[in-house]
Image (cartoon, grey):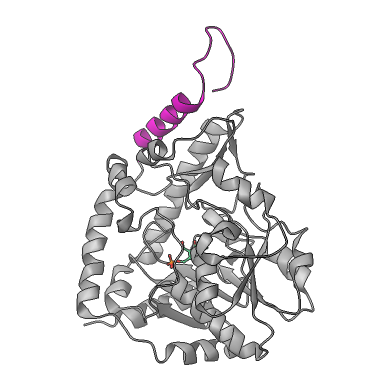
Amino acid sequence: MEDYIRKFRRELREYFQTRNVFLISSGRAALTIVLQALYRIAGDDSKNEVLIPAYTCYSVPASIVKAGLKVRLCDIDKDTLDFDYSLLPDVISTRTLAIIPCSLFGIPSDIEKLQNIIAGKEVFVIDDAAQAMGVLIDGKLAGTRGDIGLFSLDRGKNFTTIEGGIILTNRRDIAGQVEKEISSLNGYTKVSQLVILIKAIIISQILRPSFYWIVANFPGLGVGGTFYSTRFSIKNMSNTQAGLACNWRENLTRFNLARKENTEYYYSELSGSHKFQCLKSNPDATYHRFPVYINGEEKIDIKKLELLGVSQRYPDSVDNIPELEYKDENNYPVASSVPNELRCLPTHPNLKKSSRQRLVQQLKKLFLPPRAPGSQSKI
Ligand SMILES: Cc1ncc(COP(=O)(O)O)c(C=O)c1O
C-alpha cells in the first residue's frame, strides 16, 4: 500500500514552502503538542500563560488547559473578530508564553501588527489557521506567518479528512521539540480508521441543504456543534486519513473559490441593510462560514435558523465557558456581545445557487417586516 502519510507530508511541505510538517489526529491535538513543545523550549516555569481572543473556538482554550497551561484573554474587534490590538499590549506580560491569533471564519488575523507589538519580547506566535487553509495574505499563506502554524482537517473545514491536524514550522528548534513530543504517540486502530471512512461517506451526503435538519438534530456527527472538552485523544494521523486527502490541492483551490463566490453573493444581498450587518470586507478572506450580525431586540430562534443551515457557532465568550472556570478582573464586552448577535451562513462548496438564494429569502422573511406598498428600502 502506498504510504499516503509520506506523500501528504511531502505535498504539504512543497505547497507551504515549509521545511517541517507533522500530521496528527486533530487541530486540538496539534495545538496541545505545539504548546507543550514551546513550553519546553522556553524552559521557564513562570512562562505558562497563553493569550487568545476572548471570542474563539472552544477547542483553543481546551488545548491550552490540556497542555497544562493557563488561558489569558484579550477582547476582540467586532469588525474583524481578531484581537483588539489596542488592548493587547496591556495583556502581554513576562508570563506570556505564546499568543494565538485564530483567523476566525477564514478572516486572516493581522499577524504583522501583532509582530510589531511583541517586537523584542520573548513570546511565540502560533498562527492558528484551523479555519483558514489556503488563504493568501500579501503572498504568504495562512499558517506560515508565525513561529509555528497549524490547520484542522475536521468536518466542515476548508477541506477535510473527517478528523486531522497539521503542524508546520520552519524553525528547526521548534520542529525538533515537536518531533520529540509526538515520537511516543499511538496511531489509530484498524476499527477507528474504518469508522472514519464510514463518517466520510455519511458527511459527504449530509452536507447538502436539504439535510441541514440532520446536522441540526444530531450534534454527535460533529458538523456545526461546539462544546468545551479537554477529553480528546492525541494520536498520529492514520494512513486512511492521509489517503482521504488525495487531490487535496485541487480540491482546496476549487472549494475555496466556491466559498468566495458564495460570500460575494451574501455580501451583495445582505450588506447595506439596517437589519443585517456584514463584517468589514477583507479581500484576502476565504470565509469558511459567512458571519453576519443580526441587529435588533427580538430573540433569535436559534433552532429555526439551524434548520436553514445558519448557526450560532460559539454560544458564549471564552470567559463565560463554565468548565473553564476562568477568572480575572477584566471584562470582555465585545466578545460577550457577539454570540447573541452573530450568526453564520454556510459557504461550503455543495451549496447550490438556488439554495443560497432560498436561504437569503427566508432570512429576510424572518427578520425584515413586509415592505409597505411603494416603499424604497433596499431589502
Ligand atoms: C481556531 C481553531 N483552532 C483549533 C481548532 C481545533 O481543531 P479540531 O476541531 O480539528 O480539533 C479549531 C476547530 O474548529 C479552530 O476553529
Residue 308 against residue 156 in the figure, above or below: above
| Res 342 quadrant in image | top right
Residue ID at (48%, 92%): 180
Name the quarter where the N terminus is drawn: bottom left
Q: Position of residue 184 (x, y in %)?
A: 40, 91
Q: How many marks?
A: 0
Residue 18: x percent and y percent? Answer: 53, 79
Q: Is 174 inside the magenta-drawn segment?
A: no
Please tell me which residue lies in front, 26 or 4: 26
Can residue 57 be seen in the rendering of this structure?
no
Describe residue 356's horizontal placement relative to residue 372 as left or right: left
In the figure, is residue 204 to the left or right of 183?
left
Can residue 361 be found in the magenta stretch?
Answer: yes
**Residue 364 vs residue 252, the one in the foreground:** 364
In this view, 149 is above or below 204: below
Which residue is drawn at the image coordinates 26% and 68% (left, top)? 196
Tell me where residue 341 appears, x and y as whole percent.
56, 41
Give, as a single range, the part of the protein colored magenta. 352-379
Instruction: Report whether 54 appears left or right of 313.
Output: right
For residue 152, which quarter of the picture? bottom left
Answer yes or no: is residue 188 visible: yes
